[in-house]
Image (cartoon, rainbow, N blue to C red):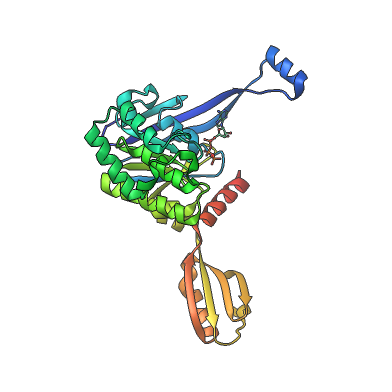
Amino acid sequence: MTHSHAISALDLTKTYTFHQQRAGLGGALKSLVKRKYETRLAVDRVSFTIDPGEVVGLLGPNGAGKTTTLKMLSGLLYKTSGELEVLGYTPSDRKPDYLRRIALVMGQKTMLWWDVPAMESLLLHKEMYGLSTPEFERNVAELAELLDVQDLLNVQVRKTSLGERMKLELMAALVHGPEILFLDEPTIGLDVVAKARVRTFLAEVNRLRGTTILITSHDMDDIEALCSRVMIIDHGRLQFDGALDELVRTAQPRKLVRATYATAVDASRLTGVSSVEVSGLTVRLEADRERTSDVLEQLTRLGPLVDLDVADADVEDIMRDLFERRGEAS
Ligand SMILES: Nc1ncnc2c1ncn2[C@@H]1O[C@H](COP(=O)(O)OP(=O)(O)OP(=O)(O)O)[C@@H](O)[C@H]1O
């Protein structure tokens, strides 16, 4: 493997082996005597490379293997098999030099101490990562300004709101200037405004510092705002790796069309369309991507048009379609 990639994974695989507890007290006692082990293939021969400075979205339904992948990349979990190299290191060695160059933020976990101000945690990170005072101060100033948290650094963390805490969390993750940022659901539970702030901040960090970002999110707005490339993982397998708009094109053959007329029209005359819905003077329908121009022509002939709108389906719907179709097929 070459070192020009920030991340390179070849047939990366993780199998969890766990001990199945039997139900009830009797079951618990039996489990002690005769342990029953089960295995679960969480990540299944996944291969990809990510270049420095890329922002990549890791998508998939619940239990697909996204968190497991991020944990292997950040060295929290050993891989079961395959090859994995991040910045030239084997992540699970957890060499201090490696840990200095990466960061992992998990939306539901905190690395801040609750009972003291965030600044205390930042100072701890300064010691842990051996940052010089000028470097630390420069980073703190830059991040605090980008995140607009200057006034929060000396407030006890437990007194901050969820959105404020996520900003402080990102600050703690980035204060040592990592080259790669692993983000697991960074906007989970945040309100719309806080989500947008986090997105803008991440885009800025990528732009200003060239930080490579690998992000999982259930919020498609996060992905659309940040990632030009997405990887889709389902049942541990990598199902798609490419441009977000390519995904939209390949996975979503339909266009959503909405036409509003000045007078009532008879939509039953339309051909080659599906999911036709008429409400008042507005007609909504879906058209095959290749047939869009024909459908638009029919719509203009149908009556006096006031408004016409053609859109791709939401990426979230596309995902749903994709996984439902796969589910039916298997
Ligand atoms: N410690 C563990 N022991 C056993 N099985 C596990 C463990 N952690 C995860 N799994 C299983 O491995 C599979 C992948 O889990 P993972 O958390 O990576 O999925 P995910 O894509 O991050 O899901 P979500 O979107 O729900 O967070 C799931 O079937 C999960 O139940």
Q: Which x, y percent locates residue 149?
A: 37, 47
Q: Which x, y percent locates residue 182?
A: 40, 38
Looking at the image, residue 299 lies above or below residue 216:
below
User: What residue is rendered at 48% in x and 77% in y?
Assistant: 308
Q: Regarding ligand 1, which quadrant of the image does it lie in?
A: top right
User: What residue is rendered at 36% in x and 34% in y?
Assistant: 122
State which quarter of the image contains the N terminus: top left
User: What residue is rendered at 62% in x and 72% in y?
Assistant: 277
Left or right, 217 with respect to 329, comes to left
Looking at the image, residue 44 lies above or below residue 313:
above
Left or right, 163 with respect to 25, comes to left
Residue sticking out furthest to the top = 33
- Name the foreground residue: 95 vs 4: 95
Residue 243 in view in this figure: no
Residue 70 in view in this figure: yes
Looking at the image, residue 116 lies above or below residue 244:
above
Residue sticking out furthest to the left = 134
Q: Which x, y percent locates residue 325?
A: 58, 51
- Name the foreground residue: 311 vs 71: 71
State which quarter of the image contains the C terminus: top right
- Name the foreground residue: 157 vs 209: 157
Q: Number of marks in the image?
A: 0
User: What residue is rendered at 51% in x and 75% in y?
Assistant: 295
Q: Which x, y percent locates residue 171?
A: 37, 41
- Name the foreground residue: 188 vs 13: 188
